[in-house]
Image: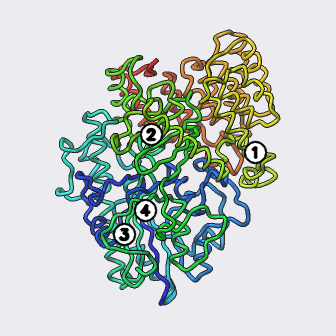
Amino acid sequence: MNKPNILWILAEDMCPNLGCYGDVDAITPHIDALAEEGIRYNHVSSVGPVCSAARTTLALGMYPSTVGTGNHRSHVALPDHIKIFSEYLQEAGYYTAINKTDYNFQVQYDGPYIKGWNTTIDVDYGGDSEAIANVLADTWQKRKDNQPFFFMHTFAITHQSKYGYPSTPEEHRKNIIPRIKPEEYRDRDTLHIPSYHPDNKETREIWGQYHETITTMDRMVGETLDKLKEDGLYEDTIIFFFGDNGMGIPSGKFNMWREGTSVPLVIRVPEKYQHLIEDYVPGSVETGAVSFADFAPTALELAGVSVPEYMQGKNFLNKTETKACTFSYRNRIDSSCELVRSVCDAQFLYIRNFYPQKGWRYSPYIAISSPYFMTQWEANVKKEYHGDSPVNRKNCFFMPRKPIEELYDLKNDPDQMYNLAHDPAYQEKCLAMRTQLKEWMLSVRDGGLIPEQELKKLSKEATAYDVIQNEVLYPMEKVLNVCDTMLDHQKTTTELLKSLADDHAVVRYWAVQAIYEKGTFNQEVLEQLLLALKDNSEMVQLAAAETLIYATSQLEYTTQAKAVIIKCLTCDDDVLLPLEALDCLDRVGDKLVDLIPYTKHLIHEAEITKEKEMTRYKQAVLSSSKYVAEKMGVPHDYAGLNDKTIPRLIEIRALRKANALDDLRIM
């Protein structure tokens, strides 16, 4: 029997908002029909809440935090033995094609195409067009006779950038989804709005636009399946339909609640290949946990290819490999420098925030993508919440801090509104999941604890993967134990000073972060933080500077701390330093408003850095340098700057002024 064709169809930025998942607002007849012929999976995690994290995981069959590829749009070198999984499919005789990669690692080329891919599906996949299905068909027709194919195609009409701007349904339908039909329009007044969003006109509009883009995507999936049938390939092709990460409406994508990582997955297997799957039942539902790390091993085994030992996922179609939970991660995304880990089982979601003092913050990209929705959300928070308000997902983005731990009962609180981490009735469950997460981080050698700029320095002599696996360079358990002092109320700030003198920069860095979180600053601690401003690690310097700004208003300390931040903002050699410094300005706010003039040179993308590997970071710095100045009320002069986001920034400024939005931090 010939090997099966395998087609992966991805939709960007969407949760399981499909009719087959019971979403009453969904109009998705083609994917629903696919689910009736196939298997629907109820617990699927994209591993990371952004496209590059998801696609890096899919490509390698590994957790990006193990390989050092956890930061969005990074450019990390892989060791020689780790390959894109499609290379193994090529070696087995498959014709492979892809339209979007978005990897967080350096790629190698074989002729004009990335190794692992015979060709590129060359089409504008972000629009509403029947040309997409035609180009897909043209591409699989180019393979040799009877050669099996593996295609990975993404529909971007559901991407975050496709809803939230423009602001009216008429404009949106005309400009973004011109082929949508009147019977597919959503009545904004009857939509179901989740508890974590304020229920207002702007919220209903963005949810309506989101659902209409999903319907548009569903039609294009149907057109693609029709092409398979026309070419006689439908019964020769195993089809996966899934999302790449959670929904793009703010508080979904980029965040670690389920709306950030939970995606749909439907798999349809033709009758001739159903023997490859244990107990295949059309129309069935699977509740076992599936991770994106499992997709590459699954595809390889379907193709009869051995799975490399280094891959961390398992063939989830083999029911003996069924998992009880999934693990997810978040590192830096765009200009938002973060570190969050989570574990999710059938009922509970546990989240560990390693930077609680940073608070939940949305990136400039989110504000610029959804200016009406986000500005009105801010206005709602200003009107309804005060300093004594309990933290929940309606006001969290405007709180100065977040808890170290979050625990949600997904069965009784599916919108994750009530954090049970400090509820006495749930302490046993919280501790069990905390332990489970720590054991997982240690087992996969989670390199996310190494600050990105520090990992870049350490990787000059070896790959990031090799650094992370090296206990001498990265004493991981020691680092994690320092982080755990944030959870230990018996551990004092003074005791952490020993770690501040450690030989490893990563240990010293986390000692500063733990001191920051503890929030107790005697004279000895202040003096040690002052010394840390001269540390040989820039990341330790910057962390100490921010902590001192937070800890004291004494001029002798704050002047020296600001000098470190200025040095990082004006660094021309490494774009990661101004990126981290801008993130610091965004967090600290008014205390550093006088440093805004030092960010002016950053609004000129070409001047940020000439370092070739850092070009993918430039957009994040460019966006953040503009938005932070807007947010702090000291906007830059954009004269002569050719940038399509400037009109939106000016509109955000006007919207914020109209709603009297100055300082929204709820103290």
Picture quadrant of residue 279: bottom left
Q: Nearer the viewer, residue 52 or 16?
A: 16
Dot 1 falls on a residue whose secondary structure is loop
In the image, taking residue 101 as reference, residue 233 lies left or right, namely left
The local crowd at label 4, few if under 14, some if 14 to 19, many if 20 or more residues have their Cα within 10 Å, is many
First in residue order: circle 3 vs circle 1: 3
654 to the left or right of 529: left
Q: Secondary structure at mark 4?
A: strand
Q: Is residue 626 above or below residue 170?
A: above
Q: Amino acid at mark 3?
A: Ala
What x and y, as percent, mark residue 404? 54, 32
**Which residue is rendered at x = 32% and y = 53% of the image?**
17
Q: Amino acid at mark 4?
A: Leu
Q: Tell me the number on the disc at residue 366.
A: 2
Is tag 3's residue or tag 4's residue first in the polypeptide sequence? 4
Mark 1 sits on what residue? 474
Dot 1, how many residues are within 10 Å of its Cα: few (below 14), some (14-19), or many (20+)? many
Nearer-N-terminus badge (1/4): 4
